[in-house]
Image (cartoon, rainbow, N blue to C red):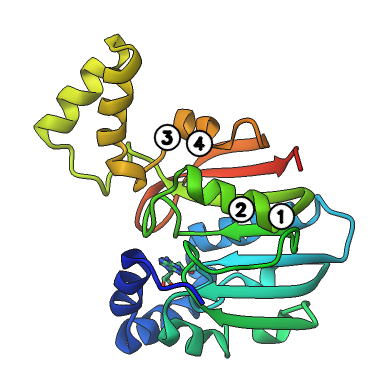
Amino acid sequence: MSADSPWAERAASLYDHAYAKRYRAHDEQFQASAPCREFADWLGRVCAMFPPPIDVLDLGCGTGRYFWALTGVRSLVGLDASAAMLEEARRPYNADRIGAPSVSLVQGDLLTHRFEAARFDLVYSVGVLAEHVPFDEPLVARLVQWLKPGGRFAFTAVHPASPSIPRTLGRRIGEGIVPAMRGRVRRGLRRRLLAGGLYADEERVRELLRPRFAVESLERIESEAHLHCLCVARKVSG
Ligand SMILES: C[S@@+](CC[C@H](N)C(=O)[O-])C[C@H]1O[C@@H](n2cnc3c(N)ncnc32)[C@H](O)[C@@H]1O
């Protein structure tokens, strides 16, 4: 078994029992939250892109807020670093509407956990990548390995234009000069503006996914906390 990354350790201590209980209580206000309803509708549309049945992984599943929104699922795995969130996911929101005949909750670090190759048709992740863990090349390589040929990766990533990110003077200057930059200087400046992978704009999402994925949709969406990129991408090679 691989050791957890500092990101997973941080998530496990942030999402402790008290936070997990509050998070799960918030799930019950689902219908009152436009972003939650939008994410659920989006996941339903993503599932409908496949002929059923499908094998699905929820990366950073938390309390299992969206389990019920999936359709045509044969097996669902929820992976999360926080034992407290997974404890809540044993009794998720709308449990009686969950269609998956098999749901496994796995405590683990999405940056180090091992799944067998080509295990999943769909890997989705809401509120985790480019937010709680860096979204970068090694992570994309892991996803490529876990997905079956033609499988899909559907995810959110915090956009650097999110109102949740302080518009410091340095950031405003950086954003102003980056269009005039080229080559290594531009890449270095962009890396800083994207906080080493903790944010991702459309350019970065496309850059990371190419050439192993074909981007099927890439839009912006506002959650209760952030402005995100919302992306669906299909694995196009081995
Ligand atoms: C904002 S919550 C999102 C939960 C759920 N996806 C949702 O939309 O309600 C972020 C979740 O990501 C998990 N997480 C963060 N870093 C992780 C890592 N390295 N490995 C596994 N889970 C992680 C946290 O424990 C937490 O449950």
Q: Nearer the viewer, mark 2 or mark 4?
A: 2
- The residue carrying mark 1 is 147
- The residue carrying mark 4 is 205
| Vertical arrangement, residue 203 with respect to residue 69, above or below | above
Residue type at the position of mark 2: Leu
Q: Nearer the viewer, mark 2 or mark 3?
A: 2
Q: Are marks 1 and 2 in contact (CB under 8 Å)?
A: yes
Q: Are marks 3 and 4 in contact (CB under 8 Å)?
A: yes
Q: Earlier in the sequence, mark 1 or mark 3?
A: 1
Residue type at the position of mark 3: Asp
The answer to whether one can see residue 37 in this image is yes
- In the picture, which quadrant includes the C terminus? top right
Binning the other alpha carbons within 10 Å of mark 4 as few (below 14), some (14 to 19) or many (20 upward) gives some
Q: Is residue 32 left or right of residue 196?
A: right
Dot label at residue 201? 3
Q: Nearer the viewer, mark 1 or mark 3?
A: 1
Q: CA distance from mark 1 to mark 3?
A: 23 Å
Residue drawn where x is 35% and y is 57% of the image: 225
| Vertical arrangement, residue 235 with respect to residue 214, above or below | below
